Image (spheres, rainbow, N blue to C red):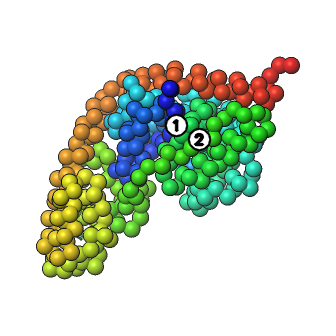
Amino acid sequence: MSKKRVFSGIRPTGEIHIGNYFGALRNWVEIQDSYDCIYGVVDYHAITTPFEAEKLPRLTFDTLAALLACGIDPQKSALMLQSDIKEHVELSWVLSCIAPLGQMERMTQFKDKSQQAPEYINLGLLAYPALMAADILIYRADAVPVGEDQVQHLELTRDLARKFNNAYGEYFPEPEPLLTHTPRIMGLDGKSKMSKTLDNHISLFEPADSLRQKIMTAVTDENRKRRSDPGNPDICNIYSLHKTVSKEEEIQMIDRECRTAGIGCVDCKKILYGHMEEFLCPFREKYQDLQKQPDTVYEIAQESRKICQPIAQETMTEVRNRMGLRKI
Ligand code: SF4
C-alpha cells in the first residue's frame, strides 16, 4: 500500500530557533519514513508582510540549508521552493474565487498581522490562507502536521476542498491534521513564546559562546531572589528547556533540588548549557557545512521540483477541466 502524502511549509525566516525545532521540525524529520513527505520553503508567503527584496534570497537559502541541517533527508522527502512551482499561485487564485470573504476576514492571523504592520495591509495578506490551502491541495495531501496556531488554517483548507468538491465533483481529499505532542517553548524572557522577532530565542545553530551567554542571563523563577530561597521549576523556563535536552534522572534531580534550594540557578544553567551545546553542535556543524555548498542545496531543491511539479500540473489540469477553463 502506498504511503499517505503529507505537505508542510515554512516561511523563509532564515534563522531557525529551538522553538521551531521542538515545536514542528523535529516532527517533520520523524515522520519521513511513515509518510510520503513534501516540504517547502514558501517564499511567496514572505511577501505578504514587510520584507526586504535584497535579503530574501539569503533568507530563502538559509532556510533550505537549515531544513537539511535539521534532518530533512532528500533521499526520503521532497524539499522544494514554492516560487519554483507556479501552480501553487494558480490554484491559490482558483481557491480565492471560492473562499467566502467574511471567512477570510475572520482569520486570526490576518487580524494579528494587520495590527503588527498597519501600513502594510494588502490583498495578499488577506488571501494568504488561500495560498496556504493551495500549497496543500496542489499535492492532494492526505495530512498536514499542525501546531495549535495553524488549526484554523487547516480547517479553511478542508472547507475549500469541500466547496470545490461539491461544486465540481469529488476530487480533493480533505487533509487531516497530524497532531503530535509539540511542547510550547517559551522565550528566554520567560514571558512570551520563543520568537526571532522578540529576540528571545536560541538559534538551532547558536555559536557556543553566545549560547552560554543567553542561557546564563535567561530569566528563571522570578520569585527566587536569593540562593537560599527554594524555587519552583514549574514556572521556570530553564527547567522547561532541561526537559528538551537533559536526561530523565537529571530532570528529576533538578526538580527536587530546586524546590529545596539544594541547587542554585547558576549551577542549574551551567548543566543546561552543557547539554544544550552537546545537542546543538551537530546541527551547527551540518549547517556550516551546507553554507559552503550552495550548489548542492539548490540542486536538492531542483530535484524536488522535478518530483513535485508533475503532481501540481496534473492537479491544475484536472481543476481547469472541471471548472470549464478549457476548449469546448
Ligand atoms: Fe529554574 Fe533551575 Fe533556578 Fe530552579 S534552580 S529556578 S529550575 S534555574
What is the spatial separation of the Cα atoms under label 1 and label 2, in whole angstroms? 9 Å
Residue 238 seen anywhere in this rendered image of the structure: yes
Instruction: Tell me the element at label 1.
Output: strand
- Residue 252 picture quarter: bottom left
Taking the spot 22% from the left edge, 68% from the top edge, the residue there is 255
Taking the spot 50% from the left edge, 26% from the top edge, the residue there is 1
Question: For mark 1, does the 10 Å Cα neighbourhood hold few (<14), some (14 to 19), or many (20 or more) residues?
Answer: many
Verify CB contact (< 8 Å) between mark 1 and mark 2.
yes
Q: Earlier in the sequence, mark 1 or mark 2?
A: 1
Report x, y in % for residue 136.
58, 37
Name the side, left or right, on which 313 lies relative to 228.
right
Taking the spot 25% from the left edge, 58% from the top edge, the residue there is 242
**Farthest residue, direction front:** 1
Report x, y in % for residue 241.
28, 58
Q: Is residue 295 above or below residue 240?
A: above
Q: Is residue 36 above or below residue 97?
A: above
Q: Amino acid at mark 1?
A: Phe
Name the side, left or right, on which 308 lies relative to 290.
right
Q: Which mark is residue 174?
A: none
Q: Amino acid at mark 2?
A: Pro
Residue that carries the numbered disc 2 in the rendered image: 175
Q: In which of the image's four quarters is ligand 1 placed?
A: bottom left
Q: Which mark is residue 7?
A: 1
| Quarter that holds the C terminus | top right
- Residue 270 picture quarter: bottom left
**Closer to the camera, 105 or 211?**
105
